[in-house]
Image: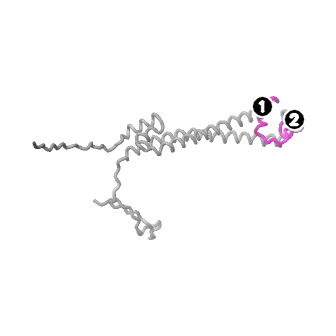
Amino acid sequence: MMFGQDTITVSKPVKHKFKPESMKATMMAVSFPGLGQVYNRKYWKIPVVYIGFGALIYGAGFYAKNYTLYLRAYQDFTDKIPQTNSYLKVIAPNVVQSTYDVVVYPKTAYPTLYAYYETGMLRLVDYYKRNRDLMYIGIGAWYLVSILDANVDASLFNYEVSNNLNITFVPMQMTLPGGYMGAGFGVDLKVNF
């Protein structure tokens, strides 16, 4: 008895090349920061996104805390109520209070020293408020940059770079203002087909 030889052709599963959709990546990045980078399979960018957010949020908190500290100190320093003295936290402890506090020590305080501390605190209030607001703007800008990164990365995910594109710098003669001729460099872009 002879056995026949069976042949079965097994087809290999077809691997589909991943091609992300830019609109889907953008919408995922809008819904949650870093999700567009996950969709694009660029996992190394996720810590960059969150480190940027963390640094900006930390800066906003730092400047907001100091803004409220100096604002309260300025308000307490300029009011006429002797019991409000939160400004003692921001003025150096080695400065004698009787030399600058015109409310508590009206006879021994120097008006010029009072004006010096008043303008100094007001300057710091403006400084911390401006930087706090810049941190808030930075958070919004970083959010938009992460969305833009997800969109561009999805759009250029399968972009092929070949050797058919060359950029060279070539010397050339340039016309300068006044009709004079001078030497310079030009950029030459060549595409080979």
Label 1, residues with CA under 10 Å away: few <14, some 14-19, many ≥20: few
Task: Using residue 4 as the reference point, say whether residue 28 is left or right of it.
Answer: right
In the image, residue 112 lies at what x, y percent? 82, 43
Indicate the amino acid at tag 2.
Pro
Residues drawn in magenta: 76-101
- Which sits in the foreground, 172 or 53? 53
Q: Secondary structure at mark 1?
A: loop
Task: Using residue 93 as the reference point, say whether residue 66 is left or right of it.
Answer: left
- Image quadrant occupied by the C terminus: bottom left
User: Quick check: is 186 in the magenta stretch?
Assistant: no
User: Quick check: is 96 in the magenta stretch?
Assistant: yes
User: Cα distance, mark 2 to mark 1?
Assistant: 14 Å
Task: Using residue 34 as the reference point, say whether residue 105 is left or right of it.
Answer: right
Q: Secondary structure at mark 2?
A: loop
* 173 relative to 89, above or below: below
Q: Which residue is mark 2?
A: 106
Q: Which residue is mark 1?
A: 79
Q: Residue furthest front?
A: 1
Q: Residue at x 40, y 63 (%)?
A: 187
Identify the colour scheme used. one colour
